[in-house]
């Protein structure tokens, strides 16, 4: 150069004019040929974005695939300059978001925290979701919720659920083997013809052999009435000492329980009149199995009650007293309040058959099956409240039924089903699955949980034949309750209670009008 500068010199571009300021023989400046070579060298450098082409390789095998990865074996000492003993770093581990959670980066500043959400191919983010098993569980739970909502929230759903319960009851009813004791002829009476049946229906004929059609039996759509009875089998006899009509009424949404006194004197088709507790045995005579005895005996008993009290009976269920003891035990016992005299009597008599259980006391007691059966049979001592004789016994029967209802009316279905399965195994019934569903639907849909009770014959509607008895055409029937001309009074009281008929009064003019209303 022609001029040198120090740090204090000020650069002035006017002092330089083109190439004049450089001498051709300046050693620091490249010649024209050297400048061309430098340009060629720069041009020959690999561009990272260049693609490989076959012209760059002499040997076909040397052509690399663009997806190939190079390893240390691709280099030798001479070409790569890498020593054999040199440490070649391993391939770095790929980052997998599934290996980490947000907690692993809690201490990192937000600006450098990695995004650990899952990604799809191509780098698009996707939300974490449940696996296949999780989705199946969610679908299953959703189905259960929808089904439960339908079952509980709709009438059709509840009917469907009740039909399942009905099928459950029907399939288990009467399964428990019962020891069958053939029923012999009633002592003191001549042989009574075995009742005739046609397609399961009782056929009643008169003395001339003509079929007697049933008349005057009342039926209402808002009432369903069923007969429940308990059988006590002793020495070839089979007396129904517990008789209960249960009516479901959807007009006032109540369950009506009507106890029939066992000593009630009734007419019996093809037999002499007798106490109502003897009717079952007359129908069951000649049966060869327990089921046949129950069906035939119940058919005759239902016919007698319908003919006597003029009320339609939709079905029946029965249980042997020994089986009833097992049922109460399966229920875990029930709570009953005892009066002083009846408690003392139960502890000193054999009504409680197992002496070890004669430990009851006045007041509330938790009774087991053996104690409950003894309690239901007592009639020689007044019950709590003063009712004695057969009246007191029917009161005890209703108290036992109410105690069972009160104990389980708030129980969950899952708790009731196993108990129900075991209990109905001892019960025989005429109800079909459809009939069971119908009556349960009446109770559930109308929320019928209130019970009322009545006893027939009603006070003033009968007289006691006493020790002298009443002649039935063959012998005197002692201590029986005869309604006679008071039968209409008992039917009227029954209709008012079950069908909610208004009580009628007779005016001095002889006009009949509902009680509390003036005649027109």
Image (cartoon, rainbow, N blue to C red):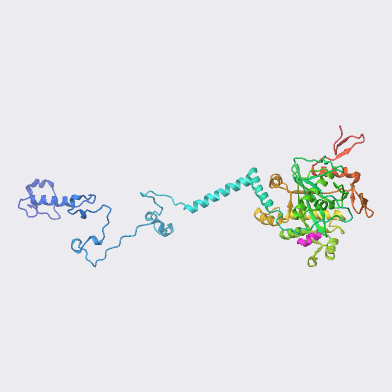
**In the image, residue 70 lies at what x, y percent?**
26, 58
Magenta stretch, main secondary structure, is helix
Residue 323 sits inside the magenta stretch = no
Residue 373 sits inside the magenta stretch = yes
Residue placed at 52% from the left, 52% from the top?
Answer: 137
Q: Nearer the viewer, residue 130 or 143?
A: 143
Snapshot quadrant of residue 307? top right
Residue placed at 84% from the left, 61% from the top?
Answer: 342
Q: Is residue 184 visible?
A: yes
* Extreme-front residue of the structure: 209
Compared across the picture, whether 424 is left or right of 491 comes to left
Quick one: quadrant of the C terminus? top right
Q: Nearer the viewer, residue 405 or 278?
A: 278
Q: Nearer the viewer, residue 67 or 9?
A: 67
| Count of numbered labels shown in the rendering | 0
Residue placed at 73% from the left, 47% from the top?
Answer: 448
Q: Is residue 398 visible?
A: no
**In the image, residue 412 lies at what x, y percent?**
66, 54
**In the image, residue 326 lies at what x, y percent?**
74, 60
Q: Nearer the viewer, residue 80 or 293?
A: 293
* Extreme-top residue of the structure: 520
* On screen, residue 15 above or below 94: above
* Extreme-left residue of the structure: 25
Compared across the picture, whether 319 is left or right of 482 comes to left
**In the image, residue 494 lies at what x, y percent?**
83, 44
- Magenta range is 366-375
């Amino acid at each position: 150069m022609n001029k040198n500068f120090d740090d204090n010199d000020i650069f002035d571009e006017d002092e330089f004019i083109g190439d004049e300021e450089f001498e051709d023989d300046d050693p620091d400046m490249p010649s024209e040929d050297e400048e061309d070579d430098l340009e060629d060298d720069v041009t020959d450098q690999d561009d990272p974005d260049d693609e490989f082409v076959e012209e760059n390789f002499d040997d076909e095998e040397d052509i690399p695939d663009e997806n190939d990865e190079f390893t240390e074996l691709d280099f030798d000492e001479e070409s790569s300059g890498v020593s054999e003993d040199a440490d070649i770093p391993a391939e770095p581990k790929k980052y997998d978001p599934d290996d980490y959670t947000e907690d692993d980066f809690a201490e990192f500043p937000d600006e450098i925290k990695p995004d650990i959400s899952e990604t799809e191919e191509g780098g698009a983010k996707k939300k974490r979701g449940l696996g296949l098993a999780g989705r199946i569980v969610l679908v299953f739970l959703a189905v259960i919720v929808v089904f439960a909502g339908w079952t509980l929230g709709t009438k059709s759903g509840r009917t469907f659920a009740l039909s399942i319960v009905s099928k459950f009851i029907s399939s288990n009813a009467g399964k428990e083997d019962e020891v069958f004791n053939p029923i012999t002829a009633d002592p003191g009476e001549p042989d009574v013809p075995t009742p005739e049946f046609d397609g399961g229906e009782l056929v009643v004929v008169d003395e001339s052999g003509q079929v007697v059609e049933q008349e005057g039996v009342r039926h209402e759509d808002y009432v369903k009435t069923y007969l429940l009875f308990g059988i006590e089998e002793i020495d070839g006899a089979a007396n129904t000492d517990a008789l209960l009509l249960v009516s479901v009424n959807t007009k006032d949404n109540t369950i009506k329980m009507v106890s029939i006194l066992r000593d009630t004197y009734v007419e019996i088709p093809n037999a002499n009149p007798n106490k109502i507790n003897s009717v079952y045995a007359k129908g069951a005579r000649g049966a060869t199995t327990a089921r046949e005895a129950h069906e035939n005996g119940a058919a005759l008993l239902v016919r007698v009650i319908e003919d006597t009290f003029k009320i339609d009976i939709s079905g029946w269920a029965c249980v042997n007293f020994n089986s009833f003891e097992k049922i109460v035990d399966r229920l875990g016992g029930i709570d009953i309040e005892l009066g002083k005299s009846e408690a003392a009597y139960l502890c000193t008599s054999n009504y409680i058959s197992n002496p070890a259980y004669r430990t009851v006391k006045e007041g509330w007691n938790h009774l087991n099956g053996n104690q409950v059966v003894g309690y239901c049979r007592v009639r020689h001592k007044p019950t709590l409240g003063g009712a004695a004789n057969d009246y007191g016994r029917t009161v005890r029967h209703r108290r036992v039924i109410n105690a069972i209802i009160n104990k389980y009316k708030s129980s969950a279905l899952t708790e009731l089903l196993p108990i129900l399965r075991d209990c109905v195994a001892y019960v025989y019934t005429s109800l079909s699955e459809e009939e069971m569903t119908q009556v349960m639907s009446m109770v559930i849909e109308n929320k019928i949980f209130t019970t009322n009770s009545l006893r027939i014959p009603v006070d003033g509607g009968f007289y006691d034949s006493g020790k002298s008895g009443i002649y039935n055409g063959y012998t005197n029937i002692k201590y029986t309750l005869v309604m006679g001309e008071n039968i209409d009074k008992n039917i009227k009281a029954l209709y008012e209670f079950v069908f909610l008929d208004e009580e009628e009064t007779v005016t001095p003019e002889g006009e009949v009008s509902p009680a509390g209303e003036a005649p027109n």
